[in-house]
Image (cartoon, rainbow, N blue to C red):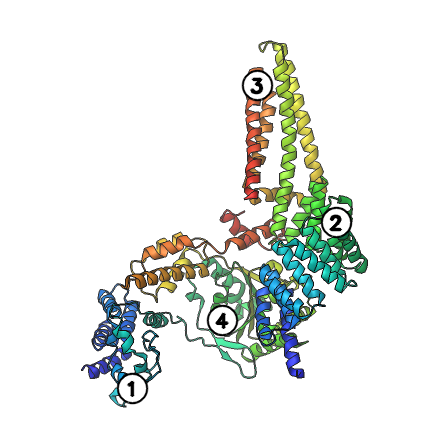
Amino acid sequence: MTSDAAKHEDAALTHARTYLSLGKPADALAALAPHLASHPDDERGLCLASQAHLVSGDAARALDAAQHAAALTPDNEWAWRLVALSYSKLGHHPEARAAAANAQAIAPQLWVTHAQVAQVDIAAKRITPESQHAAREATRLAPLEPDAHLTAGNVALAQNDWANAESSFRSALRLEPGHAAARNNLSLVMLRRGRAGSAAAGFVDILSTDPDSEVAVRNLRAVAAVALRHIHFILWVAFAVVTVAFSSASEPDGSPAYGVIWSDFLGGVALVSGVIILVYVLRMRRAAGARFGQFVRSVPRLDRLLTAWAGLLVADYLLMVAACFTTVHRAQLLYLLAGAILVAGSVVVILRRNRARS
Amino acid sequence: MDEPLISSLRRAVEATPDDIHLRLLLGQLLLKAGATAEAISQAASILQLAPANTDARQLMNDAFAAPATAEPLAAEPVAAEPVAAAPPSEPPVVPHPAVPHPAEPAADTPAPPTSAEPAAATPGAAAVTPEPEFDWSAAESDVHELAQPMFVDSTPTTAPGSAFDIERSVITLADVGGMKSVKDRLNAAFLAPLRNPDLRKLYAKSLKGGLLMYGPPGCGKTFIARAIAGELGAHFLTIGLADILDPMLGNSEQNVHEAFELARREAPCVIFFDEIDALGQRRSQTRNSALRGTVNQLLTELDGVADQNEGVFVLAATNQPWDVDPALRRPGRFDRTVLVLPPDLEARESIFRYHLQHRPVEGIELQPLARASAGLSGADIAYVCEVAAERALIDSANTGVVRMISMRDVTDALAEVTPSTSSWLDSARNVVLFGDDDGTYAELKAYLKKAKRL
């Protein structure tokens, strides 16, 4: 090959890499097409093509290109990693695991091969001691690589090991503060650990820099759902306490003393449940900081069912408060209505769940 | 034989192309003479001028229904000469209107003995297909003529010694239908200071800085950029990522410099960066060092505008302004922004008119269409017209009777097409909700509120 031809070939590959770094897989493939037409057996071109297909969501074609490259150069760890990733995307986990292990055996000195093994196991939802070892090896080989820490965090997350997951994601963010995946997964850990406010702030942060992130929008909805579920539960408990008390009361309804006692009792229940809710919301607000307002304002725009749910909970609490200032008979009616509203809230929860599944 | 008459009619039509009666007469004579394709072409031209002309429609129907055997005299010499130019299996080919017809120069110069046209006719094939069939080739030729671009003057030319195409735009803002708010904003932010040098001096208004247009895809940002160039009587130089990117070290920066140098040489010139978010992506988002150098070069060139670039007007367009490097949006660079939204009612009517005017249509009411297409982008409306035309074409092919594109075709097509702007508006909503701490997107916020998306 002449030096000019070699330069031209490298130029095509560099072009494709640049387009891939810009998130333009179609342009990368267009840049590679003439090169692959004249050099159909160039493993670097095939690997780049496989990568571009993966970015554009075409795992089957990515697998074809990667397998071709791996067949041409069986000791090419890049090609095997791409084969592993493609199989993983296609849901063929045993084949993905075998290809990742092959890449790991070819280049054990590279952190990416270990990370690939761990990632394949995470995708298969089958964390083994090998996966954990691979994740540790990746961070040992590349302690300054945020993605290595991300992989270790993901392995811990898959095992519900919140402490280690949080530590790994924080390490990744220390190395690259704008790392969207690490920020997202750290926020997920916060949510799982009951720190909904911090989680909300994290997802709002991601959306402020990447408004196209559907994952962050979905997770933000999940935070709102968790918060509402919490409030819903408090109101159910308050309702249950009052209902049990009503049904076990023996005094006649018409007695003035009976009315006074019940008013105080209902007022006490409403006050206690209101305080618990307020404390919960204030704690969320303190954790979310300046992002809390954005989070609250965004909920009605992100999900109408969430808005309906929140509206029902507010209505329910107002009925509970109103019941404190009326006769016993009316209070009973209001509590019946409050119960119906709580049931309606539960129906909204079921509707949301069904919608998410479909 | 009507050949001399046809020839003189042809000359007359060439001299007065809008004379419907002459065209009709010519078409009828051509059909009689067996020149079906030319007759179809004439009928199509008449329908383009007068879509409701029933004689023209009749002529087109007759021409399509005419058996292909009628393809003229030219068939005879070929029949005698077994040339294998046209395989028997091929359908009869209608000569392209742009190709000189052998009969045309016949008045003063003899037609060459072997012309391309006779080879097109395959008498054998025609003889076995007496049933009138839809002539795809004729239809293709017909559509080709109908679909000529509306604005043909702004042909791009490559400047000597440069890889960039530069053109003289003839479009002005008057050619942009509707979108009054965008035009007003353009005038205030960009055009008024340029047009009033005395006032500019009085108020010490600097010309430094470019204009960034943003909005959903397919809503006419590039068209507006061309219109601005036309408005300023300037050359138009459009730069895309592919024009700049070069894998060789330093070449991308050199390309940016050359683009600006060319604009300086050809001043007054509008230099338009399409998809600036790709070229000027946030430097924190890209690990590609070559691109960082390119952005730096672009910043250098932009900063030099006031001193070196008299008469160079820098415009850029993006669908994702939130991905543009903030350095590019600082004062003196792309510091003025214009939101180009999906077309308003008036603009939608204009777009429908533009895309249907060169097609055979009947009974089209533009206003109801414009009302029913709220939220669609210009590209979506173009697609609606394509789908409607396709429906009419397939129907004509199935029935063997050519029919016009009707209102129903367009409304059915409209029902099929969903706005392509929705996903952009969802992203825009997230930007306004979570990333607009400094009020950069106030205009967008107002629009989203009005559109009840916020």
Occupied quadrant, residue B146: bottom left
Mark 3, Cα crowd under 10 Å, few <14 / some 14-19 / many 20+, is some
In this rendering, which labeled residue sits more in front, label 3 or label 4? 3
Q: Identify residue for label 2.
A: A128
Q: Relative to A130, say whether B221 is above or below.
A: below
Mark 3 touching mark 1, by CB under 8 A?
A: no
Is disc 3 in the same subunit as disc 2? yes
Which of the pair B314/A230 is nearer the observer?
A230
**Where does residue A48 sit, x and y in percent of width and height?**
64, 67
Is disc 2 in the same subunit as disc 1? no
**N-term-proximal mark, 1 vs 4:** 1
Q: CA distance from mark 3 to mark 2?
A: 56 Å
Residue type of the residue flagged with mark 4: Ala
Q: Could you say which disc has been placed on residue A75 in the image? A: none
Whether residue A18 is visible to the viewer of this picture, yes or no, is: no
**N-term-proximal mark, 3 vs 2:** 2
Q: Identify residue for label 3.
A: A332
Mark 2 touching mark 1, by CB under 8 A?
A: no
Q: Please name the residue shown 59% across and 71% down the image.
A: A31
Whether residue B42 is visible to the viewer of this picture, yes or no, is: yes
Image check: B380 left or right of B50?
right
Q: Could you say which disc has been placed on residue B229 in the image? A: 4
Which of the pair A304/B232 is nearer the observer?
A304
Occupied quadrant, residue B282: bottom right
Is disc 4 in the same subunit as disc 2? no
Q: Secondary structure at mark 4?
A: helix
Residue type of the residue flagged with mark 1: Glu
Mark 4, Cα crowd under 10 Å, few <14 / some 14-19 / many 20+, is many
